[in-house]
Image (cartoon, grey):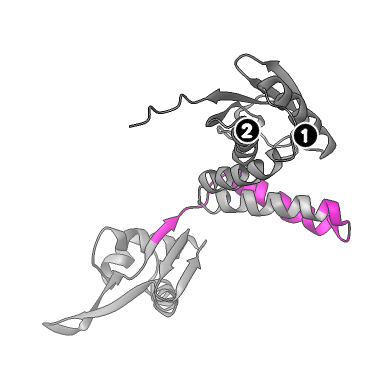
Amino acid sequence: MIFSTDNGIVALDSPVKLKILELLRKGTTSFDELVEQSKKAKSTISVHLDDLQELNLIQEKTYSNDKRKKYYVLNSICLACSELPLRRQYNEHLDNIAVAGLNSDSFVTHLFHTVRFGMEAYGFDPKPIMKRLGNDVGAKIGQKFRANDSEGVLNELSVFWREHRLGDMKILQVASPSVIVNNCYHCGKMPNVGKTLCSMDEGIIEGVFSSRLNLHYVVKETECYGTGHNHCKFVVEAQPEKPKK
């Protein structure tokens, strides 16, 4: 779990420490109550409490009517919680980085995946920022495209995807633009984790369409390797212009 303190961000994976913090999130708790509710020895709880105080995650206080008795309060904010199976994928990408060694292309790819899935493994939702960054990238890329209609943009996108080894893009519909990407560079080896994973790709496609055709487009990934499919599917929708006041 990730916690925010006055001294910065702290990541914890100790079951005992996390249990103590969970109990303190419910309110002020005495030392004896922590021992009883955690079902751990007094010496064990004492060691972990000292560690948590040193990390500035909790504060020790004493009762005004009995200075010998201690109680503890939370001194931090829980920001995020690690998520499985994305945690396992993150560890696999870390292993792949070690194997990649001096192969620059392979290293950069694994580095990107490690950052992307690492954020989610530690409980942060990277989708909004990844899509926004992809949109910015797509807007720049779109300036280099030549097409002035959706069919032309789709054709150029499929070439771009193939040339840059992002996957094999197949056009499904032109009138209501949608595409399927096989062998997706981003999530092609991911198991079914119950969610779509290609928010940056959503943003890139969205940015290309919007910048090239001068309309506001919204791109939604509806199928993904991360949802148990053997491809990624993106649906492109032009948003109606708002009437001028």
Please check the rendered image and state whether residue 93 is part of the magenta-colored stretch, yes or no.
yes
Asked whether the viewer can see residue 88, the reply is yes
Look at label 1 and name its amino acid.
Answer: Trp
Q: Quadrant of residue 187?
A: top right
Mark 2: secondary structure: helix
Q: Nearer the viewer, residue 60 or 4?
A: 4
Q: Position of residue 121 (x, y in %)?
A: 57, 50
Q: How many marks?
A: 2
Residue at 60% x, 28% y: name it.
227
Q: Residues within 10 Å of mark 1 (few under 14, many from 20)?
A: some
The residue that disc 1 covers is: 161
* Span colored in magenta: 78-106
Q: Residue furthest right?
A: 103
Whether residue 147 is situated above or below residue 43 in the rendered picture: above
Q: Position of residue 45 (x, y in %)?
A: 39, 71
Q: Nearer the viewer, residue 197 or 168?
A: 168
Q: Position of residue 69 (x, y in %)?
A: 21, 80
Q: Nearer the viewer, residue 221 or 141?
A: 141
**Which tag, 1 or 2, sits closer to the chain's start?**
1
Principal secondary structure, stretch drawn in magenta: helix
Point out the frontmost of discs 1 and 2: 1
Look at label 2 and name its amino acid.
Answer: Gly
Q: Position of residue 143 (x, y in %)?
A: 69, 40
Q: Residues within 10 Å of mark 2 (few under 14, many from 20)?
A: many
Between the residue at mark 1 and the residue at mark 2, the CA separation in whole angstroms equals 20 Å
Mark 1: secondary structure: helix
Whether residue 156 is situated above or below residue 185 in the rendered picture: above
